[in-house]
Image (cartoon, rainbow, N blue to C red):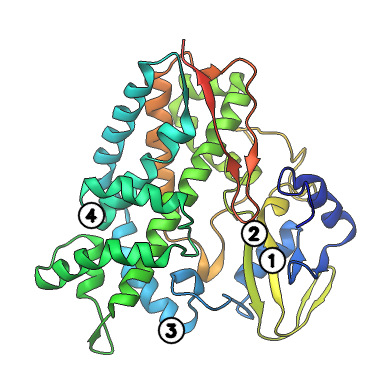
Amino acid sequence: MAPGIVDDPFPLYRTLRARHPLHHDEPFGAWLLSRYADVGAALADPRLVAPPPGRTLTHLESATHTAHRALLAPALQERALDALKAGVERTAYVLARRIARRDEADLVEEFCHWLPAVAVVRALGLPYEGTAHVAALCRAGLTHLGGAPEALDVFLRPHIVRRRAHPTDDLLGALCAARTDGRPLSDETVCGLAATFLGAGGHTTGRALAALLANLLDHPEQLALVRAGPELADAAWAESLRRDPAAHIVLRRATEPVRVSGGTIPAGATVACLMGAAGRDPDRFPDPDRYDLFRTDPGGLAFGAGRHRCPGARLARLTADAGLRALLTELPAMTWAPGFRPVGTGLLTRSPAALRVRLG
């Protein structure tokens, strides 16, 4: 929370990992975990639970979390994603071709905000015109943790009413038709689960896509390799998630004392798992600040671990892959605009605020 940390948290992360692997940050109100091994263990530890309050999947635990997560699963399996793929790819090329008409563009404003919103809107079965509304909600604070609840509910409730009267086979229709203990889910619960999906798929994926593009543009030789060999896109994505995850902090609450490498987390404490620090732990990754799409094991903590691993990780990967392929095809000469350098912003979630590129 100190001045300058939001601008560049990585020096602090290095200090925490080396000297204070378990540190109580009083202004933030949490115990900080920064080492890869500790963060990975904490995310999977059943004694460290999702902190209340909240209505998204991220805030749920026990049988309720398991049951509600199962409701989202069918929309995130390979068959369902294959059905979405063509539409997401088509949108990616439409967006890229619009950008290609110009000499310069901001890929965050004109691409990263829009493509993930299209993907989640299609998955939920919302009308295409809702994309702009979802993109605006993500800008207004809708994340995987929720946010903008009143505006989201106003947007979703008319669609929920229609789904209840006229069932559909999309994700929103499945949520409206679902029953737990013989009773349908409340509108509030449906909105909360939809918020999980919209926030994670729209906001978080958009930030992760922006970080991927920044890393490749910063390393033109690796960008050229991906352009020549599109099969490298998955490796480029995984390495970017390691080095620059969209979510830098994941919060948990200890239900009992938990031993970690730096000491013991007391019962009842809030725990901040520093994903941005864990991904650059030199004890886990050689030369951790370097972006290298040929890194043999980039880890896999960016989408969480254990019972709270993000169910939308596959959709995010599909979206990033479609976006990257479209941009590399339609903008073959894409480079940084003269004098531009990307600047990361955000504490809980983080990515470049802008990606200004020259196209020719």
Which image quadrant: the N terminus?
Answer: bottom right
Mark 4 or mark 1: which is in front?
Answer: 4
Q: Answer few, some or many: residues within 10 Å of disc 3's Cα (few below 14, many 20 plus, some between 14 and 19).
A: few
Q: Residue at x 44, y 70 (%)?
A: 56
Q: Amino acid at mark 4?
A: Leu
**Tag 2 or tag 4, which sits nearer the N-term?**
4
Query: Which residue position is annotated with label 4?
Result: 126
Kind of residue at badge 2: Ile
Q: Is residue 109 above or below residue 154?
A: above
Whether the residues at callouts 3 and 2 have beta carbons within 8 Å, the answer is: no
Distance (Cα) linking label 2 and label 1 = 6 Å
According to the picture, the residue beneath numbered tag 3 turns out to be: 63
Q: Which residue is mark 2?
A: 249
Residue type, label 1: Ala
Give the crowd class for mark 1: few <14, some 14-19, many >=20 residues within 10 Å: many
Contact, mark 3 vs mark 4 (Cβ under 8 Å): no
The residue that mark 1 highlights is 272
Mark 4: few/some/many CA within 10 Å (<14, 14-19, 20+): some
Q: Are marks 4 and 2 in contact (CB under 8 Å)?
A: no
